[in-house]
Amino acid sequence: MMMNQKTRTGIYIKDSDNINQALRKFKKKVEESGKLDDLRTKEYYEKPTTERKRANGAAKARLKKKLQKEALPKKR
C-alpha cells in the first residue's frame, strides 16, 4: 500500500548566499511547483456549476485567442 507523500519545497542556502537571493530562489521554486495557485483555488469553496462556467469561459477565451492568431491580417 502506497502512502501519499507530500513533497516539500525548499532550497539549500550556502553561507555566502545573500538573503535576497535565497528568497528569490525560494519564490521561484514555489511558483514553479504550482502550490500557490492550488492554494488560491482552494481558498474558497466554488460550486461545481461555477467551476464549470469558469472553465468553459477560459476554454472559449483560449479558442478565440488561437483563432485570432491564425487569422489572416486585415486588409487596409
Image (cartoon, rainbow, N blue to C red):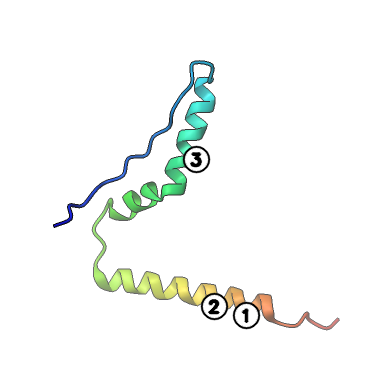
- Give the vertical position of 33 relative to 66 (above or below): above
74 lies left or right of 60: right
How far separated are the C-alphas under marks 3 and 2? 29 Å
- Give the vertical position of 37 relative to 64 (above or below): above
Residue at image coords 52%, 32%: 24
24 lies left or right of 3: right
10 Å neighbourhood of mark 2: few (<14), some, or many (≥20)? few
- Give the vertical position of 75 relative to 32 (above or below): below
Residue at image coords 23%, 58%: 45
Which residue, as the protein is rendered here, is positioned at the far top?
15
43 lies left or right of 11: left
Instruction: Look at the numbered disc 2 and give the secondary structure of its residue.
Output: helix
Residue at image coords 37%, 39%: 9
The residue that label 3 is drawn on is 28
> Type of residue at label 1?
Leu
Residue at image coords 38%, 69%: 54
Instruction: Look at the numbered disc 1 and give the secondary structure of its residue.
Output: helix
The residue that label 1 is drawn on is 67
The residue that label 2 is drawn on is 63
Q: Earlier in the sequence, mark 3 or mark 2?
A: 3
- Residue 22: image x %, image y %? 49, 27
- Residue 19: image x %, image y %? 49, 21
- Do callouts 1 and 2 mark residues in contact (Cβ within 8 Å)? yes
How far separated are the C-alphas under marks 3 and 1? 32 Å
> Type of residue at label 3?
Lys
10 Å neighbourhood of mark 1: few (<14), some, or many (≥20)? few
Which of label 3 and label 2 is nearer to you?
Answer: 3
Image quadrant occupied by the C terminus: bottom right
